[in-house]
Amino acid sequence: MRLRAGVAALALVGPLAACGIVPDDPAAVPTSVVPPVPAATTAAGLSPDGFDAEHRIALRLRSVTCDGIATGSGFAIDEHTLVTARHVVDDATSVQVSTYDGHDVLTTTATIARDADLAVVTTVDALPVGATLAGSDPAVGDPVTVVGYPLGKALDVTTGHVTAGRDDPLRENAAPVLVTDAPVEAGSSGSPVLDDDGHVAGVVYAKGQDDTTYFVPVSTLRSMLDDEDAFVPTPGCS
């Protein structure tokens, strides 16, 4: 079951308070966006403008569709290209992007991966910070950090560890995915998962029943970016 427009975009595998194994199909997600709240901050690595590198990487996305607006997260991989989750933009007629410091970025096109919950959006305006992709996937037990815009609120950072690798329970990704106990909420889809060096080790796309987080590993992202046939234009309204 793929999420559609008009919701805070994050594929939920099950109710947030439930426990147990991940079922085959996701439950419904919230239908409204919570107003912004003050952003979280961290102490280390502050840049001259008062934000650390983790905050500067993440981007807020709003997908405008025929049915409403969906929110999600993303990150830049170069000055005019960002990565997010496919279900954040796959029904979009336009995509609005804003940076960590509230600046709006004009976008041009969005494309979605055929075989993974990944998407690429290009921009006219320059993005502030490009992320570095990790050279390999994190291993079980490795620490990770998730940076995004949960519930349509302000930028947030959560931490945890990789807990497992498995086939995608939502069947949106052909390749295996990774699981972490770093918590996320709806609106976190597309958030970068950073390794201990601050490099992107994966992309958030779903949340499990037991407060686990599912992400597409960087190996899948790299293989998609290297394949010019891996992405196709967004279908727009459907």
Image (cartoon, rainbow, N blue to C red):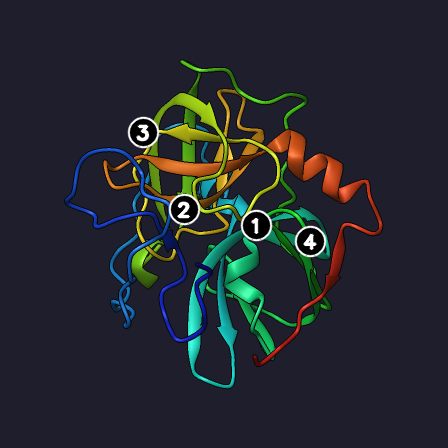
Residue 231 appears anywhere in the view: yes
Residue 133 appears anywhere in the view: no
10 Å crowding of disc 4: few (<14), some (14-19), many (20+): some
Residue at the image point whose x is 43% and y is 63% from the top: 3
Residue 206's disc is: 2
Residue at the image point whose x is 69% and y is 53% from the top: 114
Residue at the image point whose x is 84% and y is 50% from the top: 228
Residue 181's disc is: 3
**Amino acid type, mark 4:** Arg
Q: Nearer the viewer, residue 21 or 234?
A: 21
Question: Alpha-carbon distance for marks 2 and 1?
Answer: 10 Å
Secondary structure of the residue carrying numbered label 4:
loop
- Residue that mark 1 sits on: 117
Q: Is residue 103 above or below residue 39?
A: below
Residue at the image point whose x is 62% and y is 32% from the top: 218
Question: Alpha-carbon distance for marks 3 and 1?
Answer: 20 Å
Q: Nearer the viewer, residue 177 or 174?
A: 174
**Amino acid type, mark 1:** Asp
